[in-house]
Image (cartoon, rainbow, N blue to C red):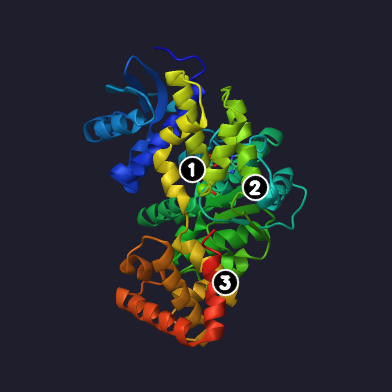
Amino acid sequence: MKLPDADQTLMQVWSEVVHDLKTAIGEKSVKAWISKLGIVGYEDGVLKLSAPSNFVRDNVLSRFSSEIITAANSYGYHVKYINVDVYDSNNQDLVTNTDEHDDVKSISVLDKRFTFENFVVGKPNEFAYAAALRVAEDKTSQFNPLFLYGSVGLGKTHLMHAIAWYVMRVHPRKKVIYISAEKFMYLFIKSLRFKDTMSFKEMFRNVDILMIDDVQFIGGKDTTQEEFFHTFNDLVDNNRQVVLSADKSPSDLEGVENRLKSRLGWGLVADVHPANYELRLGILQAKSKQYKVDIPDEVLEFLAVKITSNIRELEGALNRIVAHVTLVGRDITISVAQEVLSDLLRSNERFITIELIQKRVCEFYSVKLSDLNSPRRLKAVTTARQVAMYLCKEFTTKSLADIGRKFGGRDHTTVVHALKKVKNCIEHDRLFAADFEILAKSFES
Ligand code: ADP
Ligand code: MG
């Protein structure tokens, strides 16, 4: 069976499959193996993939075939076999405009879909979008570094890739590097091992725009932080643009030295907020138009109401619906959508995370997020920490140990103590109880 117009859908499904495999085989294996694969096609029960080397192909086939098949079939495919071709590494679909260094070549891997044109702008992300566009247009030197932050799946990586695409199109001679913080550390550590830090430095010091994604992962590694700091200072001092992203603002980054934190916040710090209903609907409309699949407005509205966790999940939901329409040919109604997405809908019903609770409690008590994880015993900090722990117990399904861990690695007895303390205060301190009620209410809607 060859599906009409299915290439795009298959690509989308594949990216979902890769994401789902993290649960099945672990994030490390996905990174090491699955992320290296490309999707080629699907025909007659055979899922065709591509791999960069025989080594990757053989490993994937012997270790992960059945997991891949299971994951793909959960999107309505009927895969029986996997076929993996080894492609010529000179012919890769990687995109980069730098060609003098092998390592650089392999770091700037950009997603073709992540352009400014494909980015739907709404209130929650308009500021970050405008800042990113301004940086891409090279209209200002004030936004240096540009620091994008927000929780997972809200479009930070998309904006960074968009900057790269834009610059590569308009100024093809400029050198742009996009790299994950993890890869940055990996390359650095490798250069230490091979006593080749000079070329590591060269690699980054010759760029016009350096983008490092998810810098929260740099926290804690002292030598890398130091190197990062120097590379960073060098670039900014020479008027090269630096763009960074993280899941927290610079001042809330954990395990990052203070002078680096403050340095990171010198340029422009732009917060990407969670999408509101309008933006969610806008994204769904834009994407369903791209797939050229007709999905009734009421179904899109239904998704926009129900899937509130983040845009990645929202896209995932739409992809499943699209796959369903394409494969089964059934018209989509709200009840079909409910059936196809039952698991996603359930997990979105009460999407309250420890991070969300921490953030809101900190805002409420005006304490810094990083203080919750620190050993500080200031009254305001202790109260906020204990209240946050209590709310985590109330509104999430996390265990006491999990909760403790997310508060600077405290142990579960600390959490038990916090729960008792808060309960006691609610019963005996009217002011405290009134505050607590307001906070708790904010999680109930
Ligand atoms: P983050 O890096 O913040 O975790 P991503 O940039 O990877 O998030 O975005 C997750 C997914 O959501 C991507 O597929 C991205 O294209 C999509 N996405 C996020 N924001 C938007 C937007 N405003 N318009 C269109 N797609 C978006
Ligand atoms: Mg990202």
Q: Using the rendered image of the protein, determine whether residue 91 is visible from the camera's viewpoint.
A: no
Q: Which residue is mark 3?
A: 438
Q: Which residue is pictured at 48% across the width and 63% down the height?
A: 355
The quarter of the rendered structure image containing the C terminus is bottom right
Q: Earlier in the sequence, mark 2 or mark 3?
A: 2
- Residue 186 placement (x, y as % from top left): 41, 52
Residue 313 is labelled as 1
State the residue in front, 69 or 114: 69
Query: In 3D space, how far apart are the residues under numbered discs 3 and 1 (Cα atoms)?
Result: 29 Å
Name the amino acid type tagged 3. Answer: Ile
State the residue lying farthest toward the top: 1
Q: Residues within 10 Å of mark 2 (few under 14, many from 20)?
A: some
Disc 2 secondary structure class: loop
Disc 3 secondary structure class: helix
Q: Using the rendered image of the protein, determine whether residue 425 is visible from the camera's viewpoint.
A: yes
Query: In 3D space, how far apart are the residues under numbered discs 1 and 2 (Cα atoms)?
Result: 34 Å
Q: Where does ligand 1 appear, by image quarter?
A: top right
Q: Which residue is pictured at 60% across the width and 76% down the height?
A: 366
- Residue 216 placement (x, y as % from top left): 49, 60
Name the amino acid type tagged 2. Answer: Asp
Q: Which residue is pictured at 37% across the width and 68% down the height?
A: 403
